[in-house]
Amino acid sequence: MAGCIAPVPQVVVVVVFGVLVLFAGMAAAQRVPAPNPAAAAAPAPMPDCNGILLTYNFESRAKIRPYVADRNKQPYSFKANATVLNSGTRPLKSWAMLVTFGYGEILVGVDGAVLTGGGEMPYNTTEDAGNATSFSGYPQTDLLTPIATAGDISQIQASVGIVGTLFAGPGPFVPLPTALSLDDPAYRCPKATNVSSGVLSTCCVLTPEAEANATATAANGTDPTKNFLPRGTGDLVITYDVLQAYPSSYLALVTLDNNAKLGRLDNWRLSWEWRRGEFIYSMKGAYPSEKDTTGCIYGAAGQYYRDLDFSQVLNCDKKPVILDLPLSRYNDTQIGKIDHCCRNGTILPKSMDETQSKSAFQMQVFKMPPDLNRTKLFPPANFKIAGASSLNPDYTCGQPVPVSPTEFPDPSGLDSTTLAIATWQVVCNITTSKGAKPKCCVTFSAYYNDSVIPCNTCACGCKPDRRGPTCSTTAQSMLLPPEALLVPFDNRTQKALAWAELKHYNVPKPMPCGDYCGVSINWHISTDYNKGWSARMTLFNWDNVDLANWFAAIVMDKAYDGFEKAYSFNSTSVGKNTIFMQGLEGLNYLVKQTNMSGSDYLVPGKQQSVLSFTKKLTPGINVVAGDGFPSKVFFNGDECAMPQRIPMSNSGFRTHLSSVLSLVLVLAASAFVLLQQ
Ligand SMILES: *[C@@H]1O[C@H](CO)[C@@H](O)[C@H](O)[C@H]1NC(C)=O
Ligand SMILES: *[C@@H]1O[C@H](CO)[C@@H](O)[C@H](O)[C@H]1NC(C)=O
Ligand SMILES: *[C@@H]1O[C@H](CO)[C@@H](O)[C@H](O)[C@H]1NC(C)=O
Ligand SMILES: *[C@@H]1O[C@H](CO)[C@@H](O)[C@H](O)[C@H]1NC(C)=O
Ligand SMILES: *[C@@H]1O[C@H](CO)[C@@H](O)[C@H](O)[C@H]1NC(C)=O
Ligand SMILES: *[C@@H]1O[C@H](CO)[C@@H](O)[C@H](O)[C@H]1NC(C)=O
Ligand SMILES: *[C@@H]1O[C@H](CO)[C@@H](O)[C@H](O)[C@H]1NC(C)=O
Ligand SMILES: *[C@@H]1O[C@H](CO)[C@@H](O)[C@H](O)[C@H]1NC(C)=O
Ligand SMILES: *[C@@H]1O[C@H](CO)[C@@H](O)[C@H](O)[C@H]1NC(C)=O
Ligand SMILES: *[C@@H]1O[C@H](CO)[C@@H](O)[C@H](O)[C@H]1NC(C)=O
Ligand SMILES: *[C@@H]1O[C@H](CO)[C@@H](O)[C@H](O)[C@H]1NC(C)=O
Ligand SMILES: *[C@@H]1O[C@H](CO)[C@@H](O)[C@H](O)[C@H]1NC(C)=O
């Protein structure tokens, strides 16, 4: 099919094929002891603290198996008790204490607090926390002042019981943490000292700047219902509103709000941990992944609610997993009919579609003693959210923070608002965990060089159990002829070898492994004139799942200001040198890899657009030297692996290869054009 006339670059080919999605499993279950009421007396002799007194009281330890030869690495079980005591003049809102452990502590039980990052027990403080482990108050999130409570210790002090394992030498030496502080920028904590053997303590005081700011927050400080922390922001904010409260149950509205420019979730799965024996009686707008009430019937709930018909109860898991309802249930009066519900778990960036950036559902929650009072309301803890697509980012959520009650407009249209009875907010941020691999990768090519720079070897990780001939996970990926980009990696070997021979390139032995990416993106510089230049971007879906409503973003450091338009994508300049792109209406499907008659290989789903840039606004830009290549590329929120090289322009032969590449792509694609909704 080669050898014909070169096509016009603007020709746009949109072909659609399909993909795969992985399932992000939600966390496994692990029991944590229920919190018990506050401790008795404060551990004592920190004389002079008019701030927040932090104390870590090492209670006991006992040698446990296995016994080891190295006396300094012997495991011990230990018990400790940490307290946070407000001795100041300002309420401490949503306290969080940082403890830097120094003996490889593994936390097995935490009582009276939760790990701020929502970690699971057993919790390796070395691995999971880096240097400091953060504890958040639960259920006692706020500590009032002695003045406002006549020194009532139960309202001004929180006590955290800790049970775990550590690795240390024999006693009588006490393996204390190395540091103690408050995770609150308004306070400064001097280095903690051991006031007596086994007791570490410090007194945190307000910074002068925070002190100067004091009046505003202090005024309403004694009334816990009138003084809230400001609402936080983050990539995804979960709001937990209590709409109706009864002595033994309440109605909650849970709202997920996407604030991240490039954050996205497909078929979201939300989970949390009930810490006070609660269970879900009913739900509208979402449903639990399991309808299982055995936990209630055989547990304390069954004992307490003897007359309740548990066949009507929805879910009794301590850690329920909640899924969104499909679109078709939106009008279902039984389980639908909640604003923003029932969108199959899709959450898109606001810039793409504001109406799809939010999900919501309602649930009726039954409480257990001692919380049987309509004013005793506690949100669940340890929220986790994940998407089912492997391209969705990973989120880490903080603990619920009480915030000012949400205002709801009057449903009947009157000019009044209804306040939620109580509101908590959970802020979840996108995290890139160490060693996490991208899910997509980028290839570079240009009209002035006939070799394509492919994705890096193992750009998206290497399959450890790869069968067949071994390949090198470290060798640099081999340059390819343009048409090889259309062929699955497993079938490229011959083309790569023939190309290497023709071009006198080295062939590594063993040959490099593939990129193992579900999505690859080719960036091709097609033209470069005095006044402007153009590039062509092609998306390939090598997976087995269609990607509906895809989006991509590129960061162009120098060329951003000159961006004019994308011809076949819906593009927007969103600032920070970022160009956001999505499929045009009706063409927003990147279909999965498929069999095609007429092709020897599986054919990836493709979409393509030409992008034009002017040089008027970017004088001095050197497209060929690298300014014409994006520095970062995102697909569906995932940051793609970038090649480490760009095509060279000084190779002797500047051929008409740009035409050849266009031709190959256009012909190959148009052979299977498939307009799909
Ligand atoms: C805890 O994490 C550290 C750092 O990764 C590791 O060296 C240590 O072996 C882990 N401890 C246990 C008991 O797994
Ligand atoms: C954690 O370690 C980093 C780098 O070693 C340091 O900058 C940071 O202050 C430490 N944080 C705490 C709470 O010790
Ligand atoms: C803290 O220690 C005191 C005695 O030292 C004990 O009575 C109390 O139960 C402990 N608190 C927790 C939460 O373990
Ligand atoms: C503090 O701890 C160190 C090391 O465990 C110990 O030598 C010292 O005596 C302790 N100080 C007090 C006041 O107990
Ligand atoms: C002082 O209070 C204002 C408004 O509450 C806040 O924006 C600002 O960050 C505070 N400054 C300090 C130093 O805490
Ligand atoms: C104290 O609370 C009242 C009622 O909520 C509010 O109107 C007032 O502005 C608050 N005062 C300050 C200083 O925040
Ligand atoms: C729900 O009902 C409304 C009004 O009857 C209708 O316009 C809408 O298309 C329906 N939605 C679904 C998902 O069936
Ligand atoms: C909802 O999501 C499931 C799982 O990804 C998918 O199979 C299904 O086609 C989606 N339904 C709609 C209407 O998008
Ligand atoms: C419910 O709590 C309020 C305030 O905490 C208290 O005054 C009231 O007596 C409690 N009611 C019951 C039935 O315990
Ligand atoms: C999330 O990010 C925001 C700002 O980007 C930050 O203020 C907040 O503390 C972060 N929250 C968590 C739980 O990491
Ligand atoms: C392409 O590669 C796959 C996987 O290795 C293999 O099964 C298939 O036969 C190859 N197709 C051709 C035409 O070589
Ligand atoms: C482009 O995207 C915007 C924002 O989502 C949308 O309003 C507009 O209709 C889209 N335009 C086309 C031609 O699809």
Image: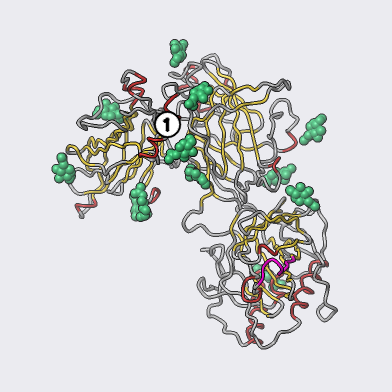
The span picked out in magenta is 612-619
- Above/below status of 158 relative to 487: above
- Above/below status of 194 relative to 424: below
Q: Is residue 662 left or right of residue 289?
A: right
Decide: few, some or many residues near mark 1? Use Cα within 10 Å; few <14, some 14-19, many ≥20.
many
- Say which quadrant the N terminus sits in: bottom right
Q: Quadrant of residue 86?
A: top left
Q: Residue at x 69, y 29 (%)?
A: 338
Question: What amino acid is labelled 1 in the image?
Answer: Lys
Q: Quadrant of residue 615?
A: bottom right
Q: Quadrant of residue 47?
A: top left
Q: Which residue is mark 1?
A: 93
Q: Is residue 356 left or right of residue 87?
A: right
Specify the principal SS of the magenta part: loop
> In the structure shown, which secondary structural element does the residue marked by tag 1 occupy?
loop
Question: Of 249 and 535, which appears nearest the observer?
Answer: 535
Question: Of 592 and 154, which appears nearest the observer?
Answer: 154
On the image, the x and y values in percent for residue 606 come to 74, 62
On the image, the x and y values in percent for residue 213 come to 42, 35
Most distant residue in the front direction:
212
Q: Residue at x 56, y 45 (%)?
A: 235
Question: Of 3 and 17, which appears nearest the observer?
Answer: 3
